[in-house]
Image (spheres, rainbow, N blue to C red):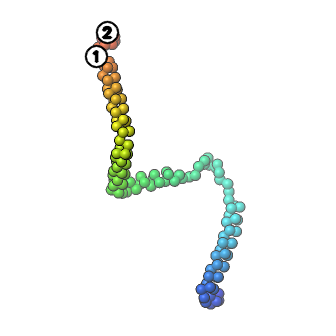
Amino acid sequence: FNTEQMTIQTKVDLEAKTARNRQKAEDDGSERLAQLREQRTVTKGRFFATRPPYNPAEIRDKEELRDRKVNPQKWAKADADLLADKQMVDKRRRDRYIMYFVEKEAQQNQLREMQQAASDAAPMVGTGNSMAEQAD
């Protein structure tokens, strides 16, 4: 046993000892870190590195791809849930702003009809209308 442990008899003694230890650890740690910072070598621009060696988004995407291979059932369910959620959001939007979507669909139908009419009126290739085809 340590003689200091024998002097800790009450909760107050224990809290005082803990506070002293914490203060000592904080003081020692800051000095050690300061010494390490002084020794640190600047590596910016070395080895043609212009950015950190990792990007959190890239790491997350790689991990998700790996998890999709490992747990295909889990991701199939997650994808189905996401699709169902998007469909419900679209339905709520349509129900709330019905006039906007009616006008939008009318414009799309009109545009589609104009494109169909334009493609029907365009001359067909290979029907004998061109001079080269008539010469053969």
Taking the spot 70% from the left edge, 65% from the top edge, the residue there is 35
Taking the spot 41% from the left edge, 52% from the top edge, the residue there is 65
Viewer-proximal residue among 127 and 48:
127
The C terminus lies in quadrant: top left
Viewer-proximal residue among 61 and 15:
15
Foreground tag (2 vs 1):
1
Q: Quadrant of residue 34?
A: bottom right
16 with respect to 94 (left or right): right
User: What percent of the width, then of the height, locates residue 45?
Assistant: 64, 48
74 with respect to 9 (left or right): left
- The mark found on residue 127 in the picture is 1
Q: Is residue 72 visible?
A: no
- The mark found on residue 43 in the picture is none
Viewer-proximal residue among 134 and 84:
84
- Say which amino acid is labelled 2: Ala
Q: Earlier in the sequence, mark 2 or mark 1?
A: 1
Label 2 SS = helix
- The mark found on residue 135 in the picture is 2
